[in-house]
Amino acid sequence: MAGFVAENILLERLKVFYWNQMDQIQPEDLLIDVRRKDEYDTGKIGNAINLPVDELRSRLSEIPKDKKIFIYCEAGLRGYLAQRILKQNGFSSVANLSGGYHSWKDCTTEAGLLK
């Protein structure tokens, strides 16, 4: 799986962003947490909406295709899968948080940014 992810990033089929680039997300963009609801309820990033990856295909109509979409999961794998689903269904601007919520939380806590 890591090989597929790396190949898709190198071939620019997929786009990633990093914990310290959260400021590139504008108010009109969508931040989607693709973890399960119980994970989302224990903590989330900013104003992220919860749309679990297992429900994504059946809920595609809820996501506007004309917006930039930033997604994350716990560590990156479900975000990768969600990004592939969205790209294969005509969403052109989708980026996945490298390392997911876990990395974001660790990095922002260590940097003194999360209170």
Image (cartoon, helix red, strand yellow):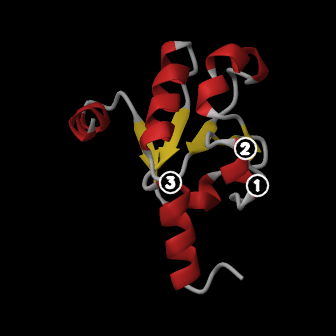
**Given the image, on which type of amino acid does mark 1 rest?**
Asp
Nearer the viewer's eye, disc 3 or disc 1? 1
Which residue is located at x 55 percent, y 47 percent? 73
**Can you give x and y, in whole percent of width and height, for residue 49 in the image?**
76, 43
Badge 1 density bin: few <14, some 14–19, many ≥20, Cα 10 Å: few
Residue to which mark 3 is pinned? 100
Give left or right: position of 69 versus 96.
Answer: right
Q: Is residue 91 above or below residue 28?
A: above
Q: For marks 3 and 1, give the CA distance.
A: 16 Å
Of the numbered discs in the image, which one, if any, rests on residue 37? 2
Q: Are marks 2 and 1 in contact (CB under 8 Å)?
A: yes
Q: Give the structural element (helix, strand or loop) at label 1.
A: helix
Q: Is residue 2 above or below residue 59?
A: below
Which residue is located at x 58 percent, y 42 percent? 71
**Can you give x and y, in whole percent of width and height, for residue 75 in the image?**
46, 53
Give left or right: position of 71 versus 13.
Answer: right
* Sequence-wise first label, 2 or 3: 2
**Given the image, on which type of amino acid does mark 3 rest?**
Gly
**Can you give x and y, in whole percent of width and height, for residue 83 in the image?**
50, 30
Which residue is located at x 60 percent, y 27 percent? 54
Q: Is residue 57 above or below residue 96?
A: above
Q: For marks 2 and 1, give the CA distance.
A: 6 Å
Q: Are marks 2 and 3 in contact (CB under 8 Å)?
A: no
Badge 2 density bin: few <14, some 14–19, many ≥20, Cα 10 Å: few
Screen quadrant of the C terminus: bottom right
Q: Residue furthest front?
A: 38
Screen quadrant of the N terminus: top left
Is any atom of residue 31 visible in this view? Answer: no
Badge 3 density bin: few <14, some 14–19, many ≥20, Cα 10 Å: many
Is any atom of residue 91 visible in this view? Answer: yes
Residue to which mark 1 is pinned? 41
